[in-house]
Amino acid sequence: MAQDAFEDLVETFAFLDDWEDRYRHVIDMGRALPPLDDALKVPATKVDGCASQVWLHPRIADGTFDFAGESDAMIVRGLIAVLHTLYAGLPVERVNAVDAPTELARLGLHDHLSSQRSNGLRAMVERIRATAAQTD
């Protein structure tokens, strides 16, 4: 089961009439993300497999998973925000139990993203899962 914030996002997507509105919403979510400190934009936080520049910086405190992220592409920054609603606040041991493809399919993203964006999204999920597995 997904986080409450992700459930709210699913409901919002169901309410929005068309994909243009949903894209705008995703972009607005990305704009709302706090910027990632330039000192954290290093090779260790860069996500390979994305057409855009993407950095994810995990933060694990008291067994709870969180991350900060940024991209140079607005839609990708929004996708980082979508992933944040899916994973942030989970106990680190539950991160890999999230079936991200199934949860993201509830938003219909796969059908509306380019193959490059889909590959990048998959790479971000893999990075999140790998990070959680290292600290689990």
Image (cartoon, helix red, strand yellow):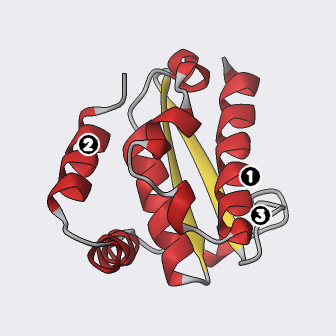
Q: Choose between 33 and 100: the one closer to the eye.
A: 100
Find residue 53 and report its image quarter. bottom right
Q: What residue is disc 3 on? A: 46
Instruction: Give the residue type that dot 1 points to.
Output: Ala
**Front residue (pair 48, 122):** 122
Q: CA distance from mark 2 to mark 3?
A: 25 Å
- The amino acid type found where label 3 is placed reads Lys
Q: Along the horizontal axis of the image, is 74 left or right of 45? A: left
Question: Disc 2, disc 1: CB below 8 Å?
Answer: no
Where residue 82 sits: x, y (%)? 42, 55
Give the structural element (helix, strand or loop) at label 1.
helix
Secondary structure of residue under mark 3 = loop
* Residue at screen point 75% across, 34% down: 130
If the image is split into quadrants, where does the C terminus sit? top right
Label 1, residues with CA under 10 Å away: few <14, some 14-19, many ≥20: some
In the rendered view, tell whether residue 63 sits above or below residue 28: above
Residue 67, above or below 103: below
Q: Which quadrant of the rendered structure holds the N terminus? A: top left
The structure residue drawn at horizontal position 56% and vertical position 56%, both measured from the top left corner, is 110
- Which mark, by number, is residue 5? 2
Is 53 displayed left or right of 93 in the figure? right
Badge nearest the viewer, 3 or 1: 1
